[in-house]
Image (spheres, helix red, strand yellow):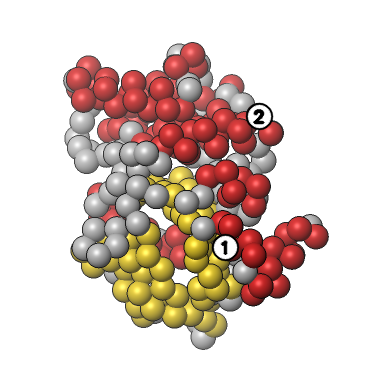
């Protein structure tokens, strides 16, 4: 049994099929990059996993439970966290307050601010700060953070909710080279304890982080395997890598 299994997933908008009989499996404690040309169906797949969209047919199994068609909150409650490309931090709150708010959204919706003194919160906060490297920014308002720091804060906010599976949408879009390098280090640390599915266009970044790469094309699985295999796969080169190398 895989950690996350997608079986014969299809999704149509009106009559147009955008996900067509797509299947893949994600192994626990690995990082999988989901790649493919524009419009291949990557974001829609993430939307289907997280319950933002309902599939037309097919099955999604997470930790042996069928989660197909469950609503977004229920899927989040079961441990699937997602960071979108556009940051959703509270700019007027400090880094610490943002992490508190994220923690309060986790499994205990009625937690109030006084309970943040509890040891579980403190331990989680320390862990997330160490991972994201934001300790020095704890009392700064999120609005003054750099683009990279904002992205790391948002990863931290998702981690405060203790996800078992973390989905990231283009985490290095718009980042400088040093920021990308730091994100590589963060994700390579994170995959020791978490399972990750990352939608990404930047193949240099994919090379640095991926244990396995899943390539989508026109809503279907084109190839899956380690990056070394994917980069030499003729069909992948035709539909995807050739395109990005020219870009
Ligand atoms: N809500 C919607 N209604 C109609 N069509 C949609 C909807 N959402 C996505 N699509 C279509 O589904 C196809 C797949 O889109 P999707 O955003 O999943 O691709 P993607 O691989 O994430 O692309 P990109 O790399 O450009 O973000 C596209 O043709 C898109 O126009």
Please name the residue shown 40% across and 41% down the image. 191
Classed neighbour count for the residue bearing mark 1: other residues with Cα under 10 Å, few (<14), some (14–19), many (≥20): some
At which x and y percent is residue 175?
65, 37
Between 15 and 240, which is closer to the camera in this rendering? 240
Say if 196 sits above or below 245 in the image: above
**Circle 1 is placed at which residue position?**
229
Quarter of the image where one finds residue 236: bottom right
Q: Quadrant of residue 159?
A: top left
Where is residue 133? Give x, y as percent: 48, 22
Q: Residue at x 59, y 22 (%)?
A: 144
- In the shown orientation, is residue 132 left or right of residue 50? right
Q: Which mark is residue 178?
A: 2
SS type, badge 2: helix
217 w.r.t. 136: above or below? below
Disc 2 packing (10 Å; few <14; some 14–19; many ≥20): few
- The residue positioned 41% from the left and 73% from the top of the image is 23
Q: Is residue 50 above or below residue 100?
A: below
Looking at the image, which residue is at 58% across and 57% down? 228
């Amino acid at each position: 049994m895989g950690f996350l299994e997608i079986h014969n997933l299809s999704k149509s908008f009106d009559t147009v099929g955008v996900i067509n009989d797509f299947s893949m499996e994600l192994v626990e404690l690995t990082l999988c990059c989901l790649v493919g040309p524009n419009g291949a169906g990557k974001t829609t797949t993430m939307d289907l996993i997280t319950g933002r969209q309902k599939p037309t047919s097919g099955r999604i199994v997470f930790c042996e439970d069928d989660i197909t068609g469950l609503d977004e909150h229920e899927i989040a409650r079961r441990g699937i966290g997602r960071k979108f490309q556009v940051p959703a931090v509270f700019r007027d709150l400090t880094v610490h307050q943002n992490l508190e708010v994220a923690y309060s959204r986790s499994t205990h919706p009625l937690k109030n601010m006084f309970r943040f003194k509890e040891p579980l919160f403190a331990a989680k906060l320390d862990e997330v700060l160490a991972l994201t490297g934001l300790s020095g920014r704890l009392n700064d308002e999120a609005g003054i953070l750099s683009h990279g720091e904002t992205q790391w804060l948002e990863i931290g906010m998702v981690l405060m909710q203790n996800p078992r599976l973390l989905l990231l949408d283009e985490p290095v879009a718009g980042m400088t080279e040093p920021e990308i390098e730091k994100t590589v280090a963060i994700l390579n640390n994170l995959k020791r304890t978490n399972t990750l599915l990352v939608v990404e266009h930047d193949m240099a970044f994919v090379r640095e982080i991926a244990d396995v790469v899943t390539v989508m094309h026109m809503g279907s699985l084109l190839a899956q395997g380690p990056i070394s295999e994917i980069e030499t796969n003729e069909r992948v080169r035709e539909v995807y890598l050739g395109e990005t190398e020219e870009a």
